[in-house]
Image (cartoon, rainbow, N blue to C red):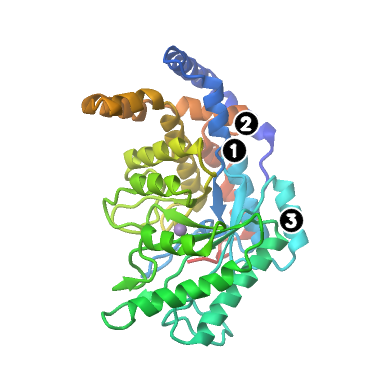
Amino acid sequence: MNINPAQISSHNESQLPDHKEKFDFLANQLTRSNIDVDSLIKKVQNLQIEVPSWALGTGGTRFGRFAGGGEPGNLIQKIEDVGVLNTLSRACDSISLHIPWDIPSDANAIKQELKTKGLTINSVNSNTFQDQPGQKKSYKFGSLCHTDKGVRKQAVDHNIEVIEYGKMLDANVLTVWLADGSSFPGQMDFRTAYSNTLSSLEDIYDKIPSGWQMLLEYKPFEPAFYHTVIPDWGTSYSMVTALGNKANTLVDLGHHLPNTNIEQIVATLQLLNKLGGFHFNDSKYADDDISVGSIKPYALFLIFLELVKGEQTNMEPAWMIDASHNLKDPLEDLLQSLQNIHLNYAKALTVDLNELKDTQESNEVAQCQEILQNAFQLDLRPLVAEARLRAGGALHPLSAFKDLKVRENLIRERGTSTVATGL
Ligand SMILES: [Mn+2]
């Protein structure tokens, strides 16, 4: 399905007078606070978030999966879906692939489709947390950490194969997330598991092309119940530091125990120049993988504030949404997540960092809080809508999605029984 610019403008038209009134009021307020509205809008437009191919279908839980209709049945259709999202939101100009769920059998056709939709592929993700049909050795007891050298080699070879697919599609990031760990005390020797993992990662790192980076994700628990080989940012940091300049840590919002101070982790990793990537989602309990900003928007704002502080001095992390949609239409959920990412980024950009610094230096605690709260509570929705409007997107992507009957069209084209690959 394609949405053309004329459809978007005609959808925007009825909402323009109301939007203009709200935006003009907000722009005047911001200008009076010495904020350059045009440059704020440009920054918001420049923040593009990668959408993973596995987030486009209905996700399940370990108890069940309730698929919706019109899901993308192949990679071309997944690219088509991200094209729709980007046309509406102007916030996601790339798609991340998961191998082997999305093996690009015809790389030229994939590249052509990406070009037509104005998209790219930045990151490719390996999968050694499941056994695939015909696979020689099992990952039941781990992959890169496994006690059997043959299993470790198979997992290393898989990652190298993923790099090769990535090269074919002009990607530049390999993301490694490991389910490796143990479910019972005594099952695994911590030191052996760490050493085996690092040694396997070294073999993969050797094949990382120049201009690429290898991202190492961490997670405290699940699927392992007792210990995860890379449970936290410190362990990931120790490994990427041992690996070299092309290896960096990836922070996934959901991969923390409740109430972890993630903004502090972001600040520390950026200070150490090792924050390579960021996965957005939100959670109430653990790795819930729900819509960005749906549970803890203030935490999201505080994280963005640290990312904005890091903007001047460090490399730009690879941004991606990593979510799963077991109830909502995945495309609607992604539009909401993109909106919340842009909104909180914009709020963080309005903080006067010099003023905040001075206030911190003089230990005016209440005033420090005021500065942050004033920025967080500002309603910048009209500004984010204006950023989309100027980029050719929809003023309200979610209502455009409904009014243009995107899901109905996808069901008509693909049927009700297609099932997207993924979890
Ligand atoms: Mn992730």
Q: CA distance from mark 2 to mark 3?
A: 24 Å
Q: Which mark is residue 376?
A: none
According to the picture, the residue beneath numbered tag 2 turns out to be 391
Residue 351 makes an appearance in the image: no
Residue at x-position 64% and y-position 29%: 9
Q: Quadrant of residue 132?
A: bottom right
Relative side of 239 to 205, left or right: left
Relative side of 147 to 360, left or right: right
Residue at x-position 40% and y-position 47%: 266
Instruction: Count the labels in the image.
Output: 3
According to the picture, the residue beneath numbered tag 3 turns out to be 111
> Looking at the picture, how far across and down is residue 105, in whole percent?
71, 68
Q: CA distance from mark 3 to mark 1?
A: 20 Å
Q: Looking at this view, is 296 or 416 the one in front?
A: 296
Residue flagged by tag 2: what amino acid is it? Answer: Ala
Tell me the crowding category of disc 1: few under 14, some 14 to 19, or many 20 or more residues within 10 angstroms, Cα based: many
Q: What is the secondary structure assignment of the residue under circle 3? A: helix
Tell me the crowding category of disc 2: few under 14, some 14 to 19, or many 20 or more residues within 10 angstroms, Cα based: some
Q: Are marks 2 and 1 in contact (CB under 8 Å)?
A: yes
Relative height, residue 417 to residue 357 (above, below): below
Q: Looking at this view, is 20 or 167 the one in front?
A: 167
Q: CA distance from mark 2 to mark 1?
A: 7 Å
Q: Is mark 2 within 8 Å of ligand 1?
A: no
Q: Which mark is residue 90?
A: 1
Q: What is the secondary structure assignment of the residue under circle 2? A: loop
> Looking at the picture, how far across and down is residue 64, in whole percent?
39, 69
Residue flagged by tag 1: what amino acid is it? Answer: Arg
Residue flagged by tag 3: what amino acid is it? Answer: Lys
Residue at x-position 42% and y-position 54%: 252
